[in-house]
């Protein structure tokens, strides 16, 4: 099953990586669940990185995800404040590999 987000631009029509013979480790790690404390009922994650199993009930996971989310928000704000350029399309790993984003840097 495919996730509901924007698929990686490097996926072919079969949903397999069109750049590499095997799915890169970075792409496997990219699907880590993203918790937004402002939307606690919604957790975004790549469905391909999960299998059925027991739920993990650990409140520490939410605290860690909240801290990561806040750090990412602060980093994004600093980038914006420094004049960093935004793009209309998502900048996925595949785009970052093949395109030059030097002009986006503040």
Image: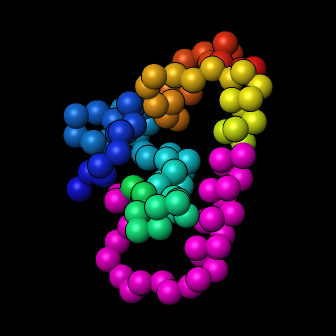
Query: Colour scheme in the image?
Result: rainbow
Single out the residue that lies furthest toward the top.
Answer: 103
- Does the segment drawn in magenta span residue 62? yes
Looking at the image, residue 33 lies above or below residue 81? below
> Who's the residue at 44% across and 36% down the image?
20
Q: In the image shown, does 46 or 39 lie closer to the viewer?
A: 39
> Who's the residue at 39% across and 86% down the image?
54
Specify the quadrant of the image occupied by residue 47.
Answer: bottom left
Quadrant of the image containing the C terminus: top right
Looking at the image, residue 38 lies above or below residue 79? below
Q: Position of residue 90 (x, y in %)?
A: 46, 31
Quadrant of the image containing the N terminus: bottom left
- Does the segment drawn in magenta span residue 30? no
Q: Position of residue 30 (x, y in %)?
A: 51, 51
Q: Main secondary structure of the magenta part?
A: helix
Looking at the image, residue 28 lies above or below residue 16? below
Q: Position of residue 10 (x, y in %)?
A: 39, 31
> Who's the residue at 67% across and 39% down the image?
76
Residue 33 showing in the rendered view: no
Q: Position of residue 68 (x, y in %)?
A: 66, 59
Single out the residue that lies furthest toward the front.
Answer: 38
Residue bounds of the magenta highlight: 47-74
Q: In the image shown, does 83 or 92 lie closer to the viewer?
A: 83
Q: How many marks?
A: 0
> Who's the residue at 52% across and 35% down the image?
93
Residue 87 showing in the rendered view: yes
């Amino acid at each position: 099953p495919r996730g509901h987000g924007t698929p990686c631009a490097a996926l072919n029509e079969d949903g397999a990586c069109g750049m590499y013979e095997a799915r890169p480790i970075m792409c496997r790690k990219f699907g880590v669940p993203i918790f937004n404390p402002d939307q606690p009922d919604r957790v975004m994650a790549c469905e391909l990185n999960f299998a059925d199993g027991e739920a993990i009930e650990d409140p520490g996971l939410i605290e860690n995800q909240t801290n990561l989310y806040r750090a990412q928000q602060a980093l994004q704000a600093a980038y914006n404040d420094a004049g960093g350029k935004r793009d209309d399309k998502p900048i996925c790993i595949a785009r970052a590999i093949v395109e030059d984003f030097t002009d986006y840097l503040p």
